[in-house]
Image (cartoon, rainbow, N blue to C red):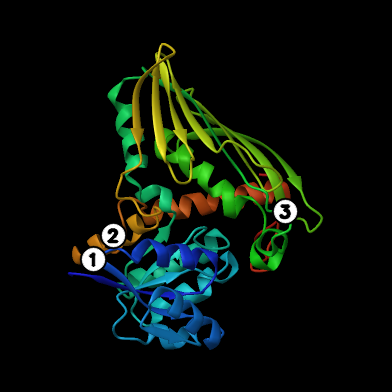
């Protein structure tokens, strides 16, 4: 595949970021954009030089020239739009959070496997070179034995509709908390023995600030924070017996510093040719399609399901409920 041809469903902010990312590339191109409004689709296409603009999502998934459908609609609609793409045999890159809940995620992945269709979650952090560099440094022993991890990600978004509306799967968890959970999983794994949390709910019942403490079976700990009511440093720090690794911007790593015995010993900046970071997930999809894979080893299906399961458990503990949660989704403590 010389060039992967992408069609985007949804013409909002994150769709713009993807179009910006792929515009300068020679091996990936956005060839189609779909919106519920044909006028909006045409305006988006004109802004980025995209060849095709559709006023319906069905028209885009029926386009034979599209290799990969990028679902860039709100969390609440990921299941519906990814299912549409799968039913038309299209490979799918689904923006994070993958779906509203684990049940929807399981159904999408099952359908994709049954139809032999590639699907992966667009949690861009997983595909970035600096994310892999952090793992390499941690495993090298340069900071000794890693024992404590912290990650925090907060933005001022308290009035955004996608945050405050339950029908859009609002709250900080699916929008921001998913990043700090992924940060902990990438570097400390999944053998979690105990979870202790605290959460502040907004007027609409959505989680607006949360802290999550994870204790692992081997004695390590991770302390995570996410929220929509403040700005913060967005740092991730992995502390070991001989030093620590500091990651500037946990969702889009831009700088890594390695400190050993409180002295800076290594500094790694983001790649000079990086556009905005969204391109890496599309290039990974291209590689997977060329190799006829149904999932990406950078974000395996089981990992996506496990994180959705983890976020379901957190929401149940906090009493955060979405309309698309079924009757089995209770608000009992877990």
Residue that carries the numbered disc 1 in the rendered image = 27
Count residues near mark 3 (Cα–Cα under 10 Å), then give few for <14, some for 14-19, many for 20+: some
Q: Is residue 257 left or right of residue 226?
A: left
Q: Is residue 178 left or right of residue 260?
A: right
Q: Give the alpha-carbon distance from disc 3 to disc 2, as whole Å.
A: 34 Å
Q: Residue at x 43, y 85 (%)?
A: 53
Residue that carries the numbered disc 2 in the rendered image = 283
Q: Is residue 224 left or right of residue 3?
A: right
Q: Say which label, 3 or 2, has the lower sequence index.
A: 3
Q: In what element is the residue under mark 3?
A: loop
Task: State if disc 1 and disc 2 touch (CB < 8 Å).
Answer: yes
Residue 184 seen in render = yes
Q: Give the alpha-carbon distance from disc 2 to disc 1, as whole Å.
A: 8 Å
Question: Which circle marks residue 158 in the picture?
Answer: 3
Judging depth in this view, the residue of 154 and 192 nearest the camera is 154
Judging depth in this view, the residue of 289 and 313 nearest the camera is 289
Q: Position of residue 272 (x, y in %)?
A: 30, 45
Q: Residue at x 54, y 81 (%)?
A: 40
Count residues near mark 1 (Cα–Cα under 10 Å), then give few for <14, some for 14-19, many for 20+: some
Count residues near mark 2 (Cα–Cα under 10 Å), then give few for <14, some for 14-19, many for 20+: some
Q: Residue at x 44, y 80 (%)?
A: 46
Q: Say which label, 2 or 1, has the lower sequence index.
A: 1
Q: Position of residue 327 (x, y in %)?
A: 68, 65
- Viewer-side label of 2, 1: 1
Q: Position of residue 214 (x, y in %)?
A: 56, 33
Residue 224 to residue 30: above or below: above
Residue 241 to residue 75: above or below: above
Q: Position of residue 288 (x, y in %)?
A: 25, 61
């Amino acid at each position: 595949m010389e060039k992967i041809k992408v069609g985007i469903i949804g013409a909002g902010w994150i769709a713009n970021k993807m179009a910006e990312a792929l515009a300068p590339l020679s091996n990936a191109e956005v060839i189609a954009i779909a919106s519920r409004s044909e006028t909006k689709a045409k305006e988006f296409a004109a802004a980025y030089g995209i060849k095709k603009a559709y006023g319906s999502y069905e028209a885009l998934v029926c386009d034979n020239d599209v290799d990969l459908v990028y679902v860039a609609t709100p969390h609440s609609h990921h299941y519906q739009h990814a299912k549409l793409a799968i039913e038309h045999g299209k490979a799918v890159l689904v923006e994070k959070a993958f779906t509203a809940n684990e049940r929807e995620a399981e159904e999408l992945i099952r359908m994709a496997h049954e139809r032999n269709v590639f699907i992966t979650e667009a949690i861009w952090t997983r595909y970035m070179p600096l994310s892999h560099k952090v793992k390499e440094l941690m495993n090298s022993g340069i900071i000794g034995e890693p024992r404590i991890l912290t990650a925090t990600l907060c933005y001022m978004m308290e009035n955004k509709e996608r945050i405050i509306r339950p029908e859009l799967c609002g709250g900080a968890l699916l929008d921001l908390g998913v990043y700090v959970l992924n940060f902990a999983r990438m570097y400390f794994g999944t053998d979690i023995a105990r979870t202790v949390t605290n959460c502040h709910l907004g007027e609409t019942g959505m989680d607006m600030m949360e802290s999550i403490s994870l204790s692992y079976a081997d004695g390590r700990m991770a302390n995570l924070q996410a929220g929509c009511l403040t700005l913060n440093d967005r740092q991730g720090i992995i502390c070991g017996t001989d030093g620590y690794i500091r990651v500037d911007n946990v969702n889009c790593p831009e700088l890594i510093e390695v400190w050993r015995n409180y002295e800076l010993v290594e500094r790694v900046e983001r790649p000079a040719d990086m556009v905005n970071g969204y391109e890496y997930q599309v290039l990974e999809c291209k590689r997977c399609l060329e190799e006829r894979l149904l999932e990406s080893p950078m974000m395996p299906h089981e990992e996506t399901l496990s994180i959705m399961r983890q976020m379901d458990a957190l929401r149940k503990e906090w009493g955060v409920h979405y309309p698309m949660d079924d009757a089995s989704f209770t608000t009992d403590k877990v």
